[in-house]
Amino acid sequence: MKNSQKLVGVALLATAAVGLALPSISKAAPSVTGKGKVTFTQDLTTNPSNNKPGESTGPELNEPSQNTDPLALKIVSVTDMDFDSHNIISNDSNKSYEALPFATTTGKDDKKEPVKTAHFVRFQDVRADTTNNYFTISAKMTKQFSNATKAQL
């Protein structure tokens, strides 16, 4: 019996010794710190296609011209508004004039085809990579309409 107690005691000591020795054997090498570098760039020279608003394919519009400034957030193009010709009314009635649809062409040289579409403001934001960007665009009249001769129109 004394021998069995000695054997059990030796087994417990051996187990404890192995348990203490294993963590030091399995230790990894000390950590090493390195340096890294990454550079992000944006292509600020590419404008969206000049298709009709809401269309991703088809012929491109010849007007309005596009803003080619290399900016991350910019207004790319704006249609000019034509409010047509109207008679001068001398009374004080409320006058409201709607803009005519935007008229331009597609195609080149002798193959230009007329196109009429709604007025639009095309803008671009390449700061984010999401497809849904929500913006509010507002406009205000900065100069009153002025008289002009036919030659100035």
Image (cartoon, rainbow, N blue to C red):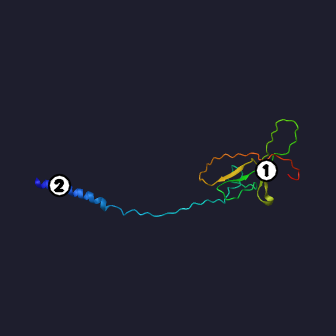
Residue that protrudes farthest toward the left in the picture: 1
Residue at the image position 87 percent from the left and 36 percent from the top: 91
User: Where's residue 126, x and y in %?
Assistant: 63, 55
Q: Which mark is residue 19?
A: none
Q: Is residue 128 left or right of residue 118?
A: left
10 Å neighbourhood of mark 2: few (<14), some, or many (≥20)? few
- Name which quarter of the figure residue 93 lies in: top right
- Residue 151, compared with residue 35, is above or below; it is above
User: Where's residue 101, x and y in %?
Assistant: 78, 47
Residue at the image position 21 percent from the left and 58 percent from the top: 14
Query: 24 and 65: which one is in front?
Result: 24
Q: Which mark is residue 9?
A: 2
User: Where's residue 41, x and y in %?
Assistant: 59, 60
Residue type at tag 1: Ala
* Circle nearer the viewer, 1 or 2: 2
According to the picture, the residue beneath numbered tag 1 turns out to be 103
- Residue 132, compared with residue 110, is above or below; it is above
Q: Secondary structure at mark 1?
A: strand
Q: Secondary structure at mark 2?
A: helix
